[in-house]
Image (cartoon, rainbow, N blue to C red):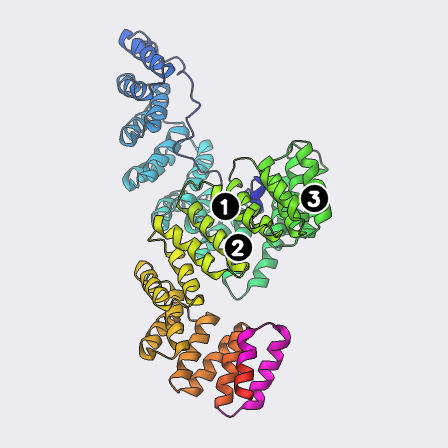
């Protein structure tokens, strides 16, 4: 769960990109134009007519009028107003035309470059994007760094990494002594999805070499190290390095609040919640403008540290003092009640979450709390009264009802909940997959097979769909050649998945390849100590005559999973 869930912004280096449809929304009447333009009666009448149209709610007419007036006057302020209205009415090509005019009218301004680039990137117009980036080079020297950073924020959010890197490379080639150039290349390389981490790291190291302990560059490097730690073998070393980079920068600039806030957030991301809380509280005690934000962050740290008493008290205090996003605060209060199994209180708290990004999840959690409180009929009635607004909400609604029935041991009703949702969303692969798993549980094998084959057709790279169908055949000892083909395809797509390794072992066992079976099952069990895998591995070892080894694996796993039905049945069958 990320830190931003309390609507407390995490100041990552890639945040704050220009948004296409928002930046000019609050524009006012243009300031006075040149005397020549003002003396043009047609221009003045055009502006008055456009503003009157706006007052009447006719944005389209206002945009059309300002478009013509901007072309006639060549005035920067008129162009700014025109671009705003053209964007709001989705006339993107016309907005790009007037943005180009705006740049000519005010060649030293950063704003028209921002808007021109945003328009170009939104419409994937690489030529105009290149023109906007290149124009930064002609800005006065004192404005270039700021302009490059503006471009960097936009490129960080652009989906096409190759195009983003190409655009950012203009700065490293033409402005090689400017640290912001390498910052732009770094965030353009990695974007928001942690792509090209090594390339991005080289660029940000170059930026820090030109400007040591630069807070924004330090933030990027720390983020890159954390991202690399999640993907690489040197995870612990990279996590330590992420904090070391920050501590070094703080030592060099102890008064940098930006760095100390970043250090607190990084400790949070590293799940060092107690240390994060100390840092947030120290920042809050300084009484700066963000003191309330820091106190909420400290409360969130207590929540994640499972210090329920402290978190409950501090979130309740925040609610009383009207601090933070009330929807998020009420949501976390509900989570605290749920964590302590105070189901009635959880229902009450979740029910008070107002419409927000947390509203839908809170409503689903109301149902779960009711079910946990032995009020299953009320839980289902609550779910069925909800009105999902999109496919994702329909999916989550069906999955929640199905899970409640499944937990209650009602697999037929769990299947029916998903089946009803498929009437509306018949091509939803997630619904198909989950309903196939339930169809198998209630012995509707033909239906399970049919749905899994449809999932494979819809999502040919979904490894677990191949695995589920192949394992179903292998477990029933039918269609073994097709089962092997399906499971091997799953293994090709996800070679290290324990469940798929288990299936590879089981189909090998069914086909009499006992040594292969034992090797796959041993790998699966090393990755995930599970009753079913232990049962399979033990059965193969038993068939190989290694009965004592099989018994040892069974007994050890049974201590960890005393309720494993398959493990008990396997032991009873083979030991008799």
44 in relation to 183, above or below: above
> Residue visible at 59% across and 62% down?
237
- Taking depth in this image into account, of 293 and 393 the one nearest to the observer is 393
Tell me which residue sits at (47%, 32%) in the image.
Answer: 142
- Secondary structure of residue under mark 3: helix
- Marks 3 and 2: CB-CB under 8 Å? no
Q: Secondary structure at mark 2?
A: helix
Q: Quick one: 243 or 456, which is closer to the camera?
A: 456
Q: Nearer the viewer, residue 19 or 131?
A: 19
Q: Quadrant of residue 50?
A: top left
Q: Which residue is mark 3?
A: 312
Quadrant of the rendering where the C terminus is positioned: bottom right
**Residue labelled with disc 1:** 383
| Magenta part, dominant SS | helix
Tell me residue 550's x, y (percent): 55, 86
How far apart are labels 3 and 2 at the CA level?
27 Å
Q: Residue furthest bottom?
A: 545
Residue 291 is left or right of residue 478, and the answer is: right
CA distance separating discs 3 and 1: 27 Å
Q: Residue at x 53, y 73 (%)?
A: 527
Residue 494 appears in view: yes
Marks 3 and 2: which is nearer the front? 2
Label whose residue precedes the other's in the sequence (2 or 1): 1
Q: Are marks 2 and 1 in contact (CB under 8 Å)?
A: yes
Calculate the distance from the C-alpha at mark 2 to the C-alpha at mark 1.
11 Å
281 or 498, nearer to the observer: 498
**Residue appearing at x 68%, y 31% in the figure:** 321
Q: Which mark is residue 404?
A: 2
Q: Is residue 259 visible?
A: no
Q: Which residues are magenta?
A: 544-569
Q: Residues within 10 Å of mark 1 (few under 14, many from 20)?
A: many
Q: Secondary structure at mark 1?
A: helix
């Amino acid at each position: 769960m990320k830190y931003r869930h309390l609507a407390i912004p995490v100041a990552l280096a890639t945040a704050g990109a220009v948004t296409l449809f928002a930046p000019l929304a609050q524009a006012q009447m243009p300031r006075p134009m040149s005397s020549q333009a003002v003396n043009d009666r047609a221009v003045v009448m055009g502006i008055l007519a456009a503003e009157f149209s706006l007052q009447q709610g006719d944005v389209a007419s206002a945009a059309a009028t300002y478009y013509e007036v901007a072309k006639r006057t060549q005035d920067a302020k008129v162009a700014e107003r025109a671009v705003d209205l053209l964007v709001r009415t989705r006339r993107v090509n016309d907005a790009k035309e007037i943005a180009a005019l705006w740049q000519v009218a005010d060649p030293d301004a950063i704003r028209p470059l921002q808007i021109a680039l945003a328009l170009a990137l939104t419409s994937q117009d690489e030529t105009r994007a290149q023109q906007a980036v290149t124009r930064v080079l002609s800005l006065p020297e004192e404005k270039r760094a700021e302009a490059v950073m503006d471009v960097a924020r936009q490129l960080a959010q652009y989906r096409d990494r190759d195009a983003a890197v190409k655009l950012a490379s203009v700065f490293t080639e033409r402005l090689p002594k400017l640290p912001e150039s390498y910052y732009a290349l770094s965030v353009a390389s990695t974007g928001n999805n942690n792509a090209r981490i090594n390339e991005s790291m080289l660029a940000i190291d170059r930026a820090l070499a030109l400007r040591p302990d630069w807070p924004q560059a330090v933030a990027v490097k720390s983020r890159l190290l954390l991202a690399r730690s999640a993907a690489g073998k040197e995870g612990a070393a990279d996590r330590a390095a992420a904090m070391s980079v920050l501590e070094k920068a703080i030592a060099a600039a102890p008064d940098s609040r930006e760095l100390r806030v970043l250090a607190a957030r990084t400790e949070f991301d590293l799940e060092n919640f107690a240390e994060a809380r100390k840092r947030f509280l120290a920042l809050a005690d300084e009484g700066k403008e963000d003191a309330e934000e820091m106190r909420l962050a400290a409360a969130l740290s207590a929540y994640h540290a499972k210090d329920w008493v402290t978190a409950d008290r501090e979130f309740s205090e925040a609610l009383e003092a009207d601090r933070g996003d009330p929807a998020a605060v009420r949501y976390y209060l509900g989570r605290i009640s749920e964590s302590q199994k105070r189901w009635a209180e959880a229902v009450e708290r979740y029910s008070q979450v107002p419409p927000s990004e947390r509203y839908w999840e809170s409503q689903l959690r109301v149902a779960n709390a009711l079910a946990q409180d032995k009020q299953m009929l009320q839980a289902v009635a609550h779910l069925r009264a909800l009105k999902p607004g999109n496919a994702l909400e329909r999916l989550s609604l069906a999955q929640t009802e199905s899970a409640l029935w499944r937990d209650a041991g009602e697999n037929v009703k769990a299947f029916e909940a998903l089946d009803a949702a498929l009437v509306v969303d018949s091509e939803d692969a997630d619904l198909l997959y989950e309903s196939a798993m339930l169809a198998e549980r209630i012995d509707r094998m033909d239906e399970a097979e049919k749905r899994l084959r449809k999932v494979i057709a819809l999502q040919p790279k979904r490894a677990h769909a191949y695995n589920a169908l192949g394992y179903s055949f292998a477990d029933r000892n039918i269609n073994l050649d097709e089962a092997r083909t399906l499971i091997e395809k799953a293994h090709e797509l996800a070679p290290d998945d324990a469940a798929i390794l288990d299936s590879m072992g089981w189909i090998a066992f069914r086909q009499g390849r006992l040594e292969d079976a034992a090797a796959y099952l041993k790998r699966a069990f090393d990755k995930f100590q599970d009753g079913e895998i232990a049962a399979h591995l033990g059965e193969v070892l038993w068939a190989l005559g290694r009965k004592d080894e099989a018994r040892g694996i069974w007994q050890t796993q049974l201590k960890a999973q005393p309720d494993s039905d398959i493990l008990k049945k396997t032991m009873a069958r083979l030991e008799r």
